[in-house]
Image: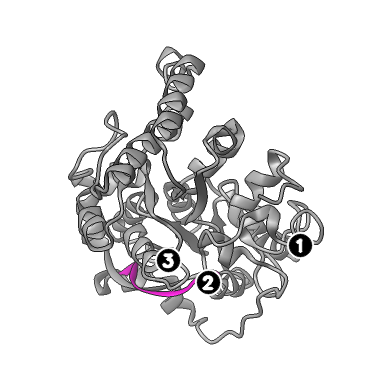
Amino acid sequence: MKYLDEFRDPKVARRILSEIRSLVTRPWVIMEICGGQTHSIIKNGIDQLLPKEVELVHGPGCPVCVTPLELIDRALAIAARPNVIFTSFGDMLRVPGSHKDLFMARSEGADVRTVYSPLEALKLAREHPEKEVVFFAVGFETTAPGNAMAVFQAKKEGLKNFSLLVSHVLVPPAMEALLGSPQNRVQAYLAAGHVCTVMGWEEYEPIAEKFHVPIVPTGFEPVDILEGILQVLKQLESGEAKVENQYLRAVKREGNPTARKILSEVFEITDRKWRGIGEIPKSGYRLREAYAAHDAEKKFAVGDLETEESELCKSGIILQGLLKPNQCPAFGAECTPQTPLGATMVSSEGACAAYYKYQRLTEKD
């Protein structure tokens, strides 16, 4: 654990905080993209230790949270088919669709199973040739390579009973969409370190230049995040706006060429709708035509469904950094982890879940 301890060292954290306090001269708003970073910030109280001039807002980097309602409803429709084994990561089971979630579908008799990787779903397809096995492929550039490899392998083996319900989204188009919004308050980004391990950070350079915002790919430990904030603030205070890599131990400029190659082989860029945000051009992946036989949306023809989002749920504006979870009227009242109105309260990376878990229940900051 020595390696991790270095990035949780209180002495180092205090030194960085001291440097931050001596540096800041005016208010700044910084968005951390990833829900994992949000949880680390709230868990360690980083937002409360920063000078009052520095405000952290939480971004849309939670894969479960941004999966659109339409896809949840399509997942439920597919899972209800009698010959289907529907597989998903655990978080997805409790994400509410228009009228219920996958956990409720399972209680009604649907064969819904939790898996820990797409390869586990692929194994089910081999073991049950009489069934259609569907994997709910959600997430950002981090989970997409594994899902691409699963469908690549299925095609290679001739497994016609394996398909993906694809809901992959991409980080850079969302960052641009937020910066281009008339309501935008974000002046700098902490980029998600694990996304950058796959895709690198070169694609952020045009965004930093176009919107004149500093972008710093950052890790997830307290010292990582504090160093990222310090690097961002140094740029803001000096008027610079460039990409600067804090996560040197994991991220290279070009990312992971092997992972990018399998992504390019299996997926192509498409427009995607983000839950609570709306459609963002060229912000997602879909399967290429060569893999259409493994596309669950085409195989099961479940496109025409009417959706119904909760009027009480504010997760959309929370994901855009325009509202803190504990500023939502339903937070901790109608909406709790036991009775979630939206995905941000369900997901282990959701901002609302972080505030609830770490008892930021009544603070109105």
User: Left of 269 or right of it: where is 113?
Assistant: right
> Closer to the camera: disc 1 or disc 2?
1
**Camera-nearest residue between 30 and 61:** 30
Tag 3 secondary structure: strand
Label for residue 117? Answer: none
Residue at x 32% of width, y 56% of height: 148
Type of the residue with mark 3:
Val
CA separation in Å, label 2 and label 3: 9 Å
Label for residue 330? Answer: 1
Where residue 147 appears, as percent x and y from the top left, is: 37, 54
Residue 42 drawn above or below residue 178: above
Where residue 202 appears, as percent x and y from the top left, is: 19, 50
Residue 281 drawn above or below residue 331: below
Instruction: Pick out the residue farthest to the front.
Output: 25
Please report whichever mark, 1 or 3, sits nearer to the chain's N-terminal start: 3
Residue at x 26% of width, y 59% of height: 207
Look at the magenta stretch and give its main secondary structure. strand
Question: For the residue carrying disc 1, how many other residues have a C-alpha within 10 Å: few (<14), some (14-19), or many (20+)?
Answer: some
Label for residue 71? Answer: 2
Type of the residue with mark 2:
Leu
The residue under label 3 is 166
Please report whichever mark, 1 or 2, sits nearer to the chain's N-terminal start: 2
Question: For the residue carrying disc 2, how many other residues have a C-alpha within 10 Å: few (<14), some (14-19), or many (20+)?
Answer: many
Instruction: Pick out the residue farthest to the right.
Output: 333
Residue 262 drawn above or below residue 311: above
State the image quarter where residue 346 is shown.
Answer: bottom right
Which residues make up the magenta segment? 275-287
> Closer to the camera: disc 1 or disc 3?
1
Tag 2 secondary structure: helix
Q: Is residue 241 visible?
A: yes
